[in-house]
Amino acid sequence: MVLSSKNDLFTLSFEPMQLKHLPQVLDIERQSFPTPWSKKTFLGELRHNQFAYYYVCLLEEQVVGYGGLWVVLDEAHVTTIAVSPQYRRRKIGARLLLFLMQQALMHGADKITLEVRPSNLSAKRLYENMGFTEAGVRKGYYTDNNEDAIIMWKQLLPNRKDETDG
């Protein structure tokens, strides 16, 4: 995949997250979130969660972003998504989210959900631009400051009921 930046072109690739990626993932995690996931949390997700799928976005061998989701029956839940601060505003987040949606479909999901902080305006705008809509609020969801979470959903495939109504 070729990604355009202001003055340069570079090729991104996506692959399943592996243990070798964790040092770079943890570095981005610490730079991106007030309460970052620990190495132990990522290891648990990678080794023991049968519903979990985690991926890295690579520029050559450098991890520039990552994301994960759980797929349970026909629903996918984005558990985490982040782009390295020095690579933000280059549409990597949109490419990564699109890739996660494609993976969700491949693993049997027809809808996808995520939570976002109301204060994270750039992430909220990205999700809205990608077709997610607000569906509710989780009060006091974020433990670092008790901030609420906006629950957002996107239908990946047409609802079967909608297909038969027309």
Image (tube, rainbow, N blue to C red):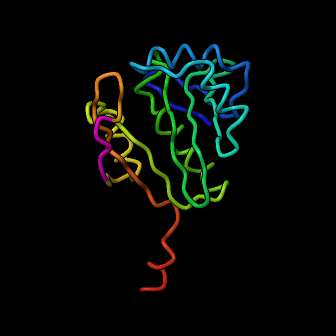
Q: Which residues are magenta?
A: 136-140
Q: Where is residue 2 drawn, in percent x and y?
A: 59, 34
Q: Where is residue 47 drawn, in percent x and y?
A: 73, 32
Q: Where is residue 139 drawn, in percent x and y?
A: 28, 40
Q: Where is residue 164 drawn, in percent x and y?
A: 48, 85
Q: Quadrant of residue 141?
A: top left
Depicted 107 relative to depicted 38: above or below = below
Q: Could you say which is closer to the camera, residue 92 or residue 41?
A: 41
Q: Could you say which is closer to the camera, residue 70 or residue 17?
A: 70
Q: Please, what is the dominant secondary structure of the magenta stretch? A: strand
How many marks can you see?
Answer: 0
Q: Could you say which is closer to the camera, residue 96 or residue 42?
A: 42
- Could you tell whether 104 is left or right of 82 in the image? right
- Could you tell whether 18 is left or right of 156 in the image? right
Q: Could you say which is closer to the camera, residue 138 or residue 87?
A: 138
Q: Quadrant of residue 15?
A: top right
Depicted 94 relative to depicted 4: above or below = below
Depicted 73 relative to depicted 57: above or below = below
Residue drawn at x 62%, y 26% as measured from the top left: 42
Q: Quadrant of the C terminus?
A: bottom left
Q: Is-magenta flag for residue 137?
A: yes
Q: Quadrant of the N terminus?
A: top right
Q: Is-magenta flag for residue 164?
A: no
Residue drawn at x 37%, y 49% as measured from the top left: 152
Depicted 14 relative to depicted 22: above or below = below
- Could you tell whether 55 is left or right of 160 in the image? right
Residue drawn at x 29%, y 46% as measured from the top left: 137
- Could you tell whether 94 is left or right of 133 in the image? right
Residue drawn at x 34%, y 47% as measured from the top left: 128
